Image (cartoon, rainbow, N blue to C red):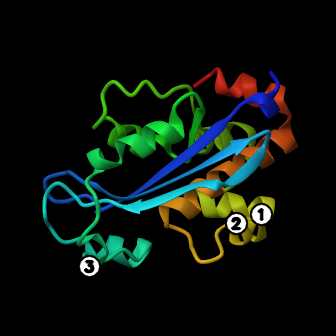
Amino acid sequence: MDFSKIDFAAIDFESTGFREDGTDEPIQIGMASMTRLEIQKESFFRSYISPKKQRPIENSMERIHRITDLDLKNAPKLNDLWPEIKSSLSGKVVVAHGAGTEKRFLRAFPMHGFSPWIDTLQLSRKVMPEAKDHSLGALIDKIGANQEITELCPELKWHDALFDSVASLVLLKELLNRFGENTIYQEMMKF
């Protein structure tokens, strides 16, 4: 399989954090594309999302992603972002690190049909079993790609949805370079 001919789109959500009732909601989305194994800066999309239920962000989550209730004051609802999400992800292989969260939040659009997916968390566990930590930040440190992400997203930091989506694409690109397309394809087919 020639991955250089595939268009990829990464997505990441930041959330309110789980509540006592076991729910959480997306409060930020970031998306980025990669064509011919080159990240397309013009594809970058980032938006805050107004939660359905007006409730404060968990303090522990605010410390992680630095998103405040004030940031969400005039943010669009997730459904209002559907045209942008559809445009960014349709017809592409969708990439996420720990894709379960992104898939869960995209259930708001039950007929979206986005597939196939590549979960860089699962993929890294298969091809880099020696890594002690498979968090996105730890893997980017391990492959030495922090500078590339910082150059692509100079004003952003970890746990910003756009920064993390770009990091997922950088990780995928590096896994393809290091382990070869056949190895990655074989591991993808096992998901």
For residue 1, side relative to residue 131 (left or right): right
Among the two numbered marks 2 and 1 on one chain, the one whose residue lies closer to the N terminus: 1
Per the image, label 2 sits on a secondary structure element best described as helix
Q: What amino acid type is highlighted by mark number 2?
A: Leu
- Residue at 57% over, 27% down: 91
Among the two numbered marks 3 and 1 on one chain, the one whose residue lies closer to the N terminus: 3
Q: Residues within 10 Å of mark 1 (few under 14, many from 20)?
A: some
- Rounded to the nearest angstrom, the CA distance separating label 3 from label 1 is 32 Å
Quadrant position of residue 179: top right
- Residue at 26% over, 79% down: 70
Marks 3 and 1: which is nearer the front?
3
> Would you place residue 140 above or below residue 6 in this image?
below
Quadrant position of residue 108: top left
> Would you place residue 190 above or below residue 119 in this image?
above
Residue 99 x/y as whole percent: 49, 41
- Rounded to the nearest angstrom, the CA distance separating label 3 from label 2 is 26 Å
Q: Would residue 94 be seen by someone viewing this image from the given angle?
A: yes
Q: Would residue 133 be seen by someone viewing this image from the given angle?
A: no
For residue 4, side relative to residue 105 (left or right): right
Q: Which mark is residue 68?
A: none
- Residue at 60% over, 31% down: 92
Q: Which mark is residue 145?
A: 1
Q: Which residue is mark 2?
A: 152
Q: What amino acid type is highlighted by mark number 1?
A: Ala
- Residue at 73% over, 66% down: 141
